[in-house]
Amino acid sequence: MPIQEVVRNGESAAYICLYLTCNTLNEPSVPVPTNRYVVLLRVSTQKQGADGLGIAAQKRDIEIFLQQRPEAQVLKELVEVESGGKELKDRKVLQEAMELCKSTSSTLLVATLSRLSRDAAFVLTLMKDTSIRFQVASMPDAENFQLGIYALLNQQEREQVSTRTRAALAAAKARGVKLGNPKNLMEWNRTRKNQARVFADQHSNLIWTLRNGGKTLREICSVMNDSGIKTSKGSVFHPVQITRILRRSPNPAELAA
């Protein structure tokens, strides 16, 4: 059965085991040292690549992974600004990373599985190549075989969430609920702005103190992240979040003047 049909039909992960096993038995396998890495970072748009926010989060995950392996050597770091939905022939940077791994017997390291692709069939096709070892920083113990299974399970979960969401919206519409009501949208925006203002007030004194002390936005991010403080959405800080908090809160130094 073609792998696209396995993914589309959402059949048992046992098919993945059969697919990977049957298609890799006769392929040459190259021993890959566990201490040599080629790092691949990917963002989907030029805007994300320009502001570096997506890249910064990936670099942080990669750095945490490497810190736990003192013997690790990063041979090269490649940045790909492409959609993960493209085929391998259209992803030149990924091809370059894979060729470098083959020529140097290195491991291809990404921050999360989605940085390879969100498409399970694409990931499973990559995992068939036994001459390359793939590793994911967020799943440090997973081997190629396991990554293929995770890719299918993740896609199944996304499809199920999408199906449940559409069903819930259809049921709400059938009950007479007006979807996209402007009044509801205004109330949601008002609540979101209030929550953002409260969050800014909680951390503005620390951030303004650091800013008035000459710290850059990135240095402030490092202080916040190293202190274990999360953004209102539970993620790490980036310069854009610090800038928003500074805009929402008055500078205590100016108020005291």
Image (cartoon, rainbow, N blue to C red):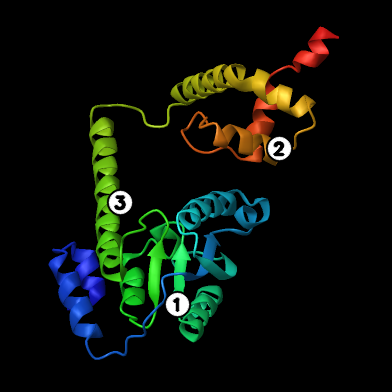
The answer to which of marks 3 and 1 sits earlier in the sequence is 1
Mark 1 against mark 2, which lies toward the viewer? 2
The answer to which of marks 2 and 3 sits earlier in the sequence is 3
Place of residue 203 in the rendered image (x, y in percent of width and height, measured from the top left): 60, 21
Q: Amino acid at mark 2?
A: Leu
Place of residue 185 in the rendered image (x, y in percent of width and height, measured from the top left): 47, 26
The answer to which of marks 1 and 2 sits earlier in the sequence is 1
Could you tell me if the residues under marks 3 and 1 are in contact, i.e. CB atoms within 8 Å?
no
Distance from disc 2 to disc 3, alpha carbons, whole Å, reads 35 Å
User: Would residue 89 be visible to someone looking at this image?
Assistant: yes
Question: Residue at 52% of width from left, 20% of height from top?
Answer: 195
Mark 1: secondary structure: helix
Q: Judge whether 242 appears above or below 83 on screen.
A: above
134 lies left or right of 66: left
Give the residue at mark 3.
158
27 lies left or right of 43: left
Q: Quadrant of residue 211?
A: top right
Give the residue at mark 1.
88
How many neighbours does mark 2 have within 10 angstroms: few (below 14), some (14-19), or many (20 or more)?
Answer: some
Q: Amino acid at mark 3?
A: Arg
Q: Quadrant of residue 245?
A: top right
Outermost residue on the front side: it is 71
Could you tell me which quadrant the C terminus lies in? Answer: top right
Q: Quadrant of residue 249?
A: top right
Distance from disc 1 to disc 2, alpha carbons, whole Å, reads 37 Å
